[in-house]
Image (tube, grey):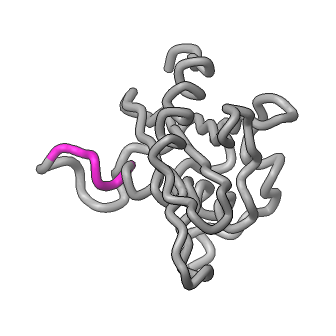
Amino acid sequence: MEEIDWVSLRAAAQAAMTRAYAPYSRFPVGAAGLTSDGRIVTGCNVENASFGLTLCAECGLVSALHGSGTPGEPALGETPRLVAVSVVDRHGSPLTPCGRCRQLLYEHGGPALLLETSAGVRPLRDYLPDAFGPEYL
């Protein structure tokens, strides 16, 4: 895979952030991910009056990863993986995913998934060491 264009990935996350539904927290978040097949998929946070039902931007990103493919693609388990992810706030500043989202991203990108954070670009394994994955089931 070629070098990751973090500026474009962050711009895609910022565009997704503008579509966030955050009337309660007023904290819109956007996420963009580069897939192993070269696509960029995005997601935004979607809040709910029942706060526990709120969806993080990373949830939308993973849903887009699975929902944006072409009919007739490879079988379950062969879906393209996330390679790099940028998550941003309303100002376009990088955010580090919460613990729940780190686990979600691990499932769909693995420990080598690159995250753009306020501390720089680092692999997910730095943020979720000894992660629980499908190999334990």
Give 52 or 132, whichever is nearer the viewer.
52
Give 112 or 7, whichever is nearer the viewer.
7
Q: Establish if 20 lies above or below 80.
A: below
Res 49 → quadrant: bottom right
Apparent side of residue 106 relative to residue 81 in the rendered image (left or right): right
Apparent side of residue 9 relative to residue 41 in the rendered image (left or right): right
Res 113 → quadrant: top right
Q: Where does the image place residue 132, in percent across and percent down from the top left?
A: 69, 70
Q: Where does the image place residue 56, in percent across and percent down from the top left?
A: 58, 61
Looking at the image, which residue sits at the far left?
Answer: 72
Apparent side of residue 42 relative to residue 67 in the rendered image (left or right): right
Q: Residue at x 71, y 53 (%)?
A: 97
Q: Where does the image place residue 67, in percent across and percent down from the top left?
A: 29, 54
Q: Is residue 66 magenta?
A: yes
Looking at the image, which residue sits at the far right?
Answer: 119
Q: Where does the image place residue 6, in percent across and percent down from the top left?
A: 62, 21
Magenta-highlighted residues: 65-70
Q: Establish if 137 lies above or below 34.
A: below
